[in-house]
Image: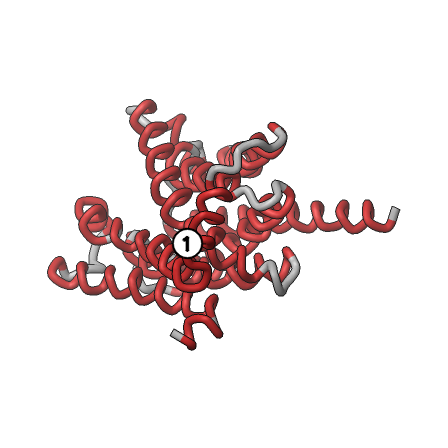
Amino acid sequence: MNLLKKTPVLCYFAITFLISWGGVFILGYPYEMPSTKEQFQALWTAVVVPYFLGPAIAGLLMTAIIGGRKGLRDLRDRLFKWRISLKWYAIALLTAPIIVTPLLFIFSLYSPVFLPGIVTSADKVSAILTGIVTGVLFGGLMEELGWTGFAVHVLLKRFSTFKTGLIIGTLHGVWHFPVKILISGPLGLSPFLVIDLITAVVNLTAWRILMVWIYNCTGGSLLTTMLMHASLTASTLFILAPTATGSSLVVYNLAAAAAVWIVVAAIFLIHHKSKEE
């Protein structure tokens, strides 16, 4: 108990990885996973859904241990903190589509595999609904109860927005490795997969910095951060996801990561300039 209280964030990460990674390998072993992309798609609810419980369980557990009932009430208040400027809702929900859509348009000029998923999907309503439900439940609710609800909230007491985002974002990216490997499909265990894993860390670190920035600017609105994560998941993995695979997808992901970092750099330059004035 003393260890949990002395190193709360480190223990949070340990519990999160233990539940998520351990769950994937334990539940996936009877199905001999990872194997094929098709098998993953058929069994992902049985194997991967528990994976997303890791951040939520660890976040709630550590909040209860460190803060007790007061800490849980504070988490609830931040979760339902909705009285904020409408511009922050717009930023949270539209940043991902605004960044991704122009990239897809440019890349689609060279190949139709980069057309947004909503354009090529035969069942557009299903694609939209699946993206929204998955984004809200898994990306938004389950993940952010832990990442922002506990880890970001604690680290911001010691570090800046950038450093906090850098720490959480890097580990958040690494946390995705088992799922990225399971859905790699044509990439297999190849150099392209290694590049794709590194790109995922770089990309998600930039997104995490943006989410920490919004969390700060909204006075600790966990709800807003959840909406931003939900939008990111829904738009990039479902509604706007291209059909590209292999090296083509790796190149696109590198471009997407660069675009997000440009946005991060622009925001911090503007913020720094405004402080000087």
**181 or 146, which lies in front?**
146
Residue hosting label 1: 69
SS class of the residue under badge 1? helix
**61 or 206, which lies in front?**
61
Residue furthest to the front in view is 69
Residue furthest to the bottom in view is 3
**27 or 156, which lies in front?**
156
Left or right of 273 on screen, residue 241: left
Q: Quadrant of residue 189?
A: bottom left
Q: Is residue 186 shown to the viewer in this render?
A: no
**Spot occupied by residue 33 in the image (x, y as percentages of width and height):** 19, 60
**Spot occupied by residue 2 in the image (x, y as percentages of width and height):** 42, 76
Q: Is residue 72 shown to the viewer in this render?
A: yes
Residue furthest to the left in view is 30
Circle 1 packing at 10 Å, graded few (<14), some (14-19), many (20+), is few
Disc 1 residue type? Arg
Q: Quadrant of the N terminus?
A: bottom left
Left or right of 160 on screen, residue 208: left
- Residue drawn at point x = 22 percent, y = 45 percent: 41
**Spot occupied by residue 166 in the image (x, y as percentages of width and height):** 57, 61
**Spot occupied by residue 12 in the image (x, y as percentages of width and height):** 41, 65
Q: How is the image coloured?
A: secondary structure
- Residue drawn at point x = 39 percent, y = 28 percent: 118
Left or right of 189 on screen, residue 82: right
**Numbered-mark total:** 1
- Residue drawn at point x = 53 percent, y = 56 percent: 152
- Residue drawn at point x = 33 percent, y = 28 percent: 129
**80 or 38, which lies in front?**
80
Q: Quadrant of residue 22?
A: bottom left
